[in-house]
Amino acid sequence: QLNMAKKKEEFLKEFKEGPLQFKPTYKFDLYSEVYDTSEKKRKPAWTDRILWKVKNLSEIASKQGEFPEEEKLISVTLDDYVSHMSYGISDHKPVTGTFKLEMKPLVSDPLVVLNPEGEWSAEHDVVIRYSAVPEFPSSAWDWIGLFQVTFRHVKDYVTYAWVEDDEISSDGNSKQVYMSASEIPRAGGEFLLCYYSNNLQTIIGISEPFQV
């Protein structure tokens, strides 16, 4: 029925689906892997499906002349498409899909470039040098965080410095801020510096990994 609907319904034609390599997921007797034994004895069917469609930003941007039409900024790959027959609380069996999402950056160069200055340790205050592109909309609420290389969220910082309150020098487009020695982890390790933009609400610059 789904394949028939995809041929007839225009909005379904652009949706994709992985190969059906699992048994029909409907209709089962509850708490079992036995197909319907009721009086109706419904024919097994693949009623539980996962369809997807990627609407690339380039589809919109290309109309405004910002990106070439052939450039795809987002790509999705289906890695796994399976049913789970062990679940029995419904007459359906659940289906899951595992996807890999790849996104190309909208800009080729970072808005902010960060570099740790000199040797970093908990024995003395440390200095960060950074520079931003001229059109970058900076804010007094921007900050630079020290993160372990394995961080997964913007709130995973070890410590941070405000770009204005902790500034110690400014030379044209290049600026320096400091972090107090008391906030540097004595255990050391491999770290990154990340610049967080309050206006853009995201990290817009990441340094190369370095040792503390």
Image (cartoon, rainbow, N blue to C red):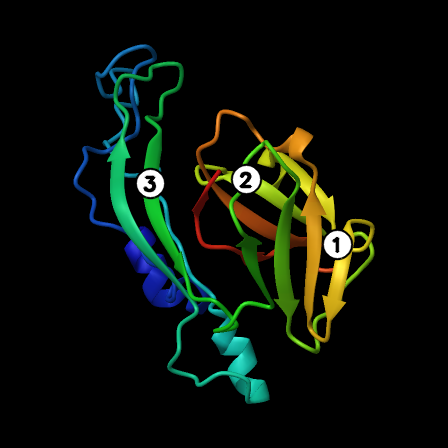
Q: Secondary structure at mark 2?
A: strand
Q: Residue at x 70, y 37 (%)?
A: 180
Q: Nearer the viewer, mark 1 or mark 3?
A: 1
Q: Label 1 vs label 3: CA separation?
A: 43 Å
Residue 45 in sight in this render: no
The structure residue drawn at horizontal position 43% and vertical position 84%, both measured from the top left corner, is: 69
Q: Disc 1 or 2, which lies upstream in sequence?
A: 2
The residue tagged with tag 1: helix, strand or loop?
A: loop
Image location (x, y in percent) of residue 212: 49, 38
Q: Is residue 30 above or below residue 71?
A: above
Above/below status of 137 relative to 47: below
Coordinates of residue 176 in the picture (x, y in percent): 69, 58
Q: Nearer the viewer, residue 173 or 205?
A: 173
Tell me the SS state at disc 3: strand
Residue 147, label in figure: 2
Q: Dot 1, crowdedness within 10 Å: few (<14), some or many (≥20)?
A: many
The numbered mark, 1 or 3, whose residue comes first in the sequence reads 3
Front: mark 2 or 3:
2
| Amino acid marked by disc 3 | Gly
Q: CA distance from mark 2 to mark 3?
A: 32 Å
CA neighbours of label 3 inside 10 A, class few (<14), some (14 to 19), many (20+)? some
User: Residue at 58% across / 50% down in the picture?
Assistant: 194
**Residue designated by label 3:** 97
Near-viewer residue (196 or 158): 158
To which residue does mark 1 refer? 163
Depth check: give the residue in front, 198 or 102.
Answer: 198
Q: Earlier in the sequence, mark 2 or mark 3?
A: 3
Residue 44: x %, y % from top left: 23, 31
What amino acid is labelled 1 in the image?
Val
Say whether marks 1 and 2 touch (CB < 8 Å): no
Residue 32 seen: yes
Q: Outermost residue toward the top?
A: 31
